[in-house]
Amino acid sequence: MTDYEVSFILNGREVQAPPGTTVLEAARKLGHPIPTLCHHPLLDNENRCGICTVEREPATLIRACSTPVEQGAVYHTASPAVVAHRREVAKLLLSRHELDCHVCDRHGACELEKLVGQLGITDGSLVGLASKSFTDRTSASVTLHGNRCLACGRCITLCNELGWGALRMDEELLQARPVDEPGLAGPRCVSCGQCTLVCPSGALVPRTAVMPVEAALMDRDRYCVAVLEPAAAAALMNEFGVSAQSRLIGTLTSLGFAGVIDSAWGADAYLAKVADWLHRKNPPVALVSPCEAVRRYLRLNRPELTAWIPPVPGPSQITAFNWRQKLSPELGLAPGRCYLVQITTGTAAKEEVRCHSADRERGLDASLTVRELSGLIRRLGLTPEKAKARSYTHLRGSRLGMMLGAPGAASDGLAVVWSHRSGSSLSALIEKFLPPEEEEREIELPDGEMARVIVAHGGSRIKGAIEEAEKLSEKKMASRILLELYTCPGGCLGGGGLHHLAGPAELQQRYQALAFLAGGAKFDYPHQNKRLKRFHPELFEPIV
C-alpha cells in the first residue's frame, strides 16, 4: 500500500484504492458485481434508485455509486440484507412499470429486465399496479413511453449536459417528460436521440418503422431497396462480428431487399451540390454538414440563420431520389413500385423522411436505425456471419464520401470538389478526421481564398460555434466561414440510433472501422464517380 491509498475490507478481503474512489468503482475493478440503474459511467447524474446499495459494518446500508471508500471500513456487496433491499427496490420500480416486455423495443437489452432476472424476483406481490403516466408520440424520431419510465434521471442529465434542456422530471407522475408543451416535437428537442442511448428501460426509444418495412418486404408488388450508410454498416459489422461487408449485404438480401445501394454515392452528390451552392450564392457563413438535427435546431430556434443552410437534402435522400427517378427506369422498374429504406445510425433522419414524405418525387419511404435493424435480424433468426456474400447494387460512393459521417470530412470534401471544378490543386488535405469535440482550422479554396472551418460535435459546443460564427461574420474577421456541426458526439459514429452511449475510446474504434470500410472503396474522390457525373453533369462543369 502506498501513502495515498485507502485500505478497507471488501467481502472479507483487504484491498486498497485511491482516495475519492467510490465503493462501486472499487468493487467493479476488483471483480465484485454491483447492479445499477440510475448510475451511468459517462454521466454525472443524481443517485435516485438505490439498486446499488451495499452494507457497511455495522449494519448500515449505503449507496455504492456515491459513497467514497473509507479507511478501515468493512463492506459487503451481497449480504442477505443487501439482496433483500435490492429486491424490494426493484419491486417498487416494477409496481408502476407497464409489463409489456414482449412488445417493448428494449426487450432483451432492458437493464430492468436483466436486473429482475439477476435478483431472482419471481413473486408478483407489487408488480403491475396501475399508475398515471404521460406518453409522447409527437416526434417522428423519438417516442416517450411514460409507463416504462423509472425516474432514474439519466435522460434529463444527458440532455442538459448536451445543452438542449428538452426534458424535465415530473415529480407528480415520477417520470421524465418534455419541457415544451408540444412535446418532443417542440423546439427544444433536436431529435438527436441521445436520450434513448442511456434509458435503461425502453421509456425513450427511436420512433420505430419496423412494421411498415416488414410489410413492404413481404409485398410481392414492391421492389425494396436498402440505402446503407457507411457508419451504419461499420456499426452492424461490429455488432454481429462480421468482417466482410458483403456478408452484411447478403443478410439484407435475406431479409427480402432486392437491392442494397451505398449511401456514400449520395454523400458524393451532397458534397458536389453544396460546393455548387457555395460558389453560386457565396454566403459568408454556411452549414456544410448534413446533420438533420442541427438543421432542425436552426430552423426552430434560430430562424434568422436559415440562410446558412444549403437547400440540399441529406446523402441518403439524394441516393434514394436518384435511384427512384433516374436509375429505376433504366432497370425497367416503375418508380412508384420501389420502396427505399434508409439504414442509419441517427434518429433525426426519420424527421427528414417525414418532411419529404408528401413530395411527389420523394426519395426515401422509411428509415431504420441500427438498433431497429439488428433487432429485426435477431428476431428472424438470421446469422450475418453465415450469410451469402453479396455486393452493392449499381450505386457506389468514393472513399471521401464514405467518411462524410466523421466530423472534419465534409469541409475537406468540399475543398476537393471545388478544387477539381476550378482546375486548381490543393496545397494540403487533412486525411484523418474525427477531431476532438471542437476544432478550428483554415482550408484553401480554389481561388486562393482561405476559409475558416469550425468543427464541433456534441451539444452545447454547437451553440458556441454558432455564436462564434456570428461574431466573426459581424466583424468580418473571416471572408468565408464553414460550419461543420453534429449534435451527436462523434457525429454519425455516435448517433442516437445505436445501442448505447459511447465514450471517446469506443468512438475511436468506430472511426477505425469506418476508415477500414472506406479503404475498400473503388475510387477516392467524388469527381471520380462516373455515374454521379452522368446523372448530374452540371455539378462538375468548370467554374469560370
Image (cartoon, rainbow, N blue to C red):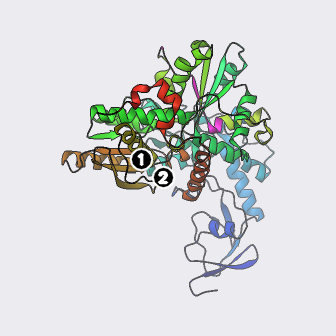
In the picture, the quarter occupied by the C terminus is top left
- Amino acid type shown at disc 2: Phe
Q: Residue at x 50, y 24 (%)?
A: 354
Residue 459 x, y percent position in the rendering: 43, 48
Picture layout, residue 119 above or below residue 132: below
Instruction: Please rate how many residues cluster around mark 2, counting C-alpha atoms within 10 Å: few if below 14, some from 14 to 19, many from 20.
Output: some
Q: Residue at x 65, y 35 (%)?
A: 372
Distance CA(mark 1)–CA(mark 2): 9 Å
The part of the chain drawn in magenta is 360-372
The residue where tag 1 is placed is 412
Badge 1 element: helix
Q: In this rendering, would 202 be left or right of 308? A: right
The residue where tag 2 is placed is 433
Where residue 290 sits, quadrant-wise, is top left
| Mark 1 and mark 2 residues within 8 Å of each other at the beta carbon | yes
Q: In this rendering, would 241 be left or right of 516? A: right
Viewer-closest of 517 and 208: 517
Q: Of the residues tagged 1 and 2, which is closer to the observer?
A: 1
User: Which disc is residue 345 wearing?
Assistant: none
Look at the image and say whether residue 371 sits in the magenta stretch.
Answer: yes
Look at the image and say whether residue 216 sits in the magenta stretch.
Answer: no
Residue 304 x, y percent position in the rendering: 27, 34
Residue 202 x, y percent position in the rendering: 63, 39
